[in-house]
Image (cartoon, helix red, strand yellow):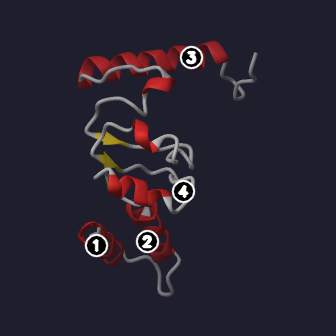
Amino acid sequence: MREAAPGRSVTRRCRHRRRARGRACRDFGAAALATEEILSADADIFAPCALGGVLSEKTIPLLKTPIVAGSANNQLANHADVRLLMERGILYAPDYVINAGGLINVAGELAPGGYDPDAALSRVATIPTVLADIFRRR
């Protein structure tokens, strides 16, 4: 049996995940899928948000989604794999762009003169424009 975080049992953690999965299905019309079904699911967006290297020459052909936009770092196994997404007409939002908001905010917190939330939000507000520029270059 795996060790759980202090004060949490594996059984309790599994029960929490089942409740969360049931709530997502009930409240949002989501479908619970087995791990091996996720890449080939008919979905609007594939959002890898945990592990990097999920998208490769082996997994990209399985995708049935028109958009890949997730927060996992380094979603592509190899940078050249972006070409496979383009060839399939899959819109790819690079993780380093859609994750930029957190980094921009931290940079603002460390800026000389102190944190200016309006300046940070102003910089974060440019992320959609950067994405649109990337998409146009495809």
Note whether residue 92 is visible: no
Of mark 1 and mark 2, the one earlier in the sequence is 2
The reply to whether the C-beta atoms of the residues labelled 1 and 2 are less than 8 Å apart is no
The answer to the question of whether label 3 and label 1 lie on touching residues, with beta carbons closer than 8 A, is no
Residue flagged by tag 1: what amino acid is it? Arg
- Dot 3, how many residues are within 10 Å of its Cα: few (below 14), some (14-19), or many (20+)? few
Give the x, y percent position of residue 79.
52, 62
The residue to which callout 2 is attached is: 104
> Residue shown at 51%/52% (left/top)?
75
Residue bearing mark 3: 14
Q: Give the residue number, with chain letter if any, for mark 4.
A: 74
On-image quarter of the C terminus: bottom left
Classify residue 123 as left or right of residue 83. Answer: left
Three-letter amino acid code of the residue under disc 4: Asn
Which quarter of the figure has residue 2? top right
Q: Identify the mark nearer the N-term, 3 or 1.
A: 3
Instruction: Say which mark, if any, is on residue 137.
Output: 1
Q: Report how far apart the C-alphas of labels 2 and 3 lie in the structure.
A: 35 Å
Locate residue 32: give its quadrant: top left
Tell which circle, 4 or 3, labels the residue nearer the N-terminal end: 3
Q: Tell me the mark number nearer the camera, choosing from 4 and 3.
A: 4
